[in-house]
Image: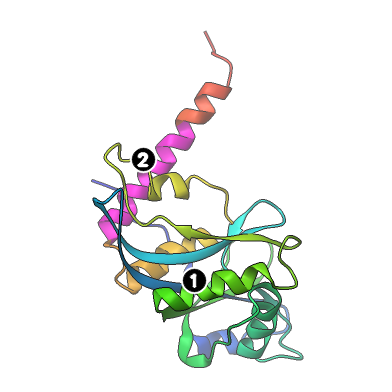
Amino acid sequence: MSAAVPELKQISRVEAMRLGPGWSHSCHAMLYAANPGQLFGRIPMRFSVLMQMRFDGLLGFPGGFVDRRFWSLEDGLNRVLGLGLGCLRLTEADYLSSHLTEGPHRVVAHLYARQLTLEQLHAVEISAVHSRDHGLEVLGLVRVPLYTQKDRVGGFPNFLSNAFTSTAKYQLLFALKVLHMMPEEKLAEALAAATEKQKQALEKLLPSSS
């Protein structure tokens, strides 16, 4: 039996807005579209989800920190999206969740999600290349492969083996579950395969104890 998909502590938007000045707020956006295509003519793509490679080599969703002294969550998010994507504005209707992060820094991570058409998603990808931060803080958008190949590693498990920002992997797994884009058991299987792959890779790097 696969282990449960790990989650951060979820709080409501109202609870998040009541947090004191000692808390920082990060806002990120998951843009996705239904994709009827098939890889190699036989593996259903199902959905296309956008993430981005950041300047520090980590994968994350488009967005960033919002200074609540000057911006609402949505205005702050749209300001950052304008720098990295250049062509999209989200609203409170796109709000999906808020989670408290683990660790010494007091951060509440807000996630927004909007379903686009595949054509609209492609337009975002094109616009991002011409945004101010492209090639600097943002090194490019990537589509998440939401399928697993016959070897049970290729596709989504391999993608989960990458390095992510502190909350991005949790938010991705959470969104895929609550938006009914992938069954929780399939998420858990992919995560377990990714963890096993990372373990095996580490064992190859470490010298034998014998």
Q: Which mark, residue 112?
A: none
At which x and y percent is residue 34?
A: 34, 71
Relative to 52, does residue 117 appear above or below in the rendering?
A: below
Q: Residue at x 50, y 66 (%)?
A: 50
Q: Which mark, residue 153?
A: 2
At which x and y percent is residue 166?
A: 60, 59
Image quarter of residue 101 = bottom right
Q: Which residues are magenta?
A: 184-199
Q: Residue at x 76, y 90 (%)?
A: 69
- Taking the magenta stretch, the answer to whether it contains residue 78 is no
Contact flag, marks 1 and 2 (Cβ < 8 Å): no
At which x and y percent is residue 130?
A: 69, 71
- 10 Å crowding of disc 1: few (<14), some (14-19), many (20+): some
Query: What secondary structure is the magenta-colored segment mainly?
Result: helix
Disc 2 residue type? Val
Disc 1 residue type? His
Secondary structure type for disc 1:
helix
Secondary structure type for disc 2:
loop
Gap in angstroms between the C-alphas marked 1 and 2: 27 Å
Report the front residue among 86 and 179: 86
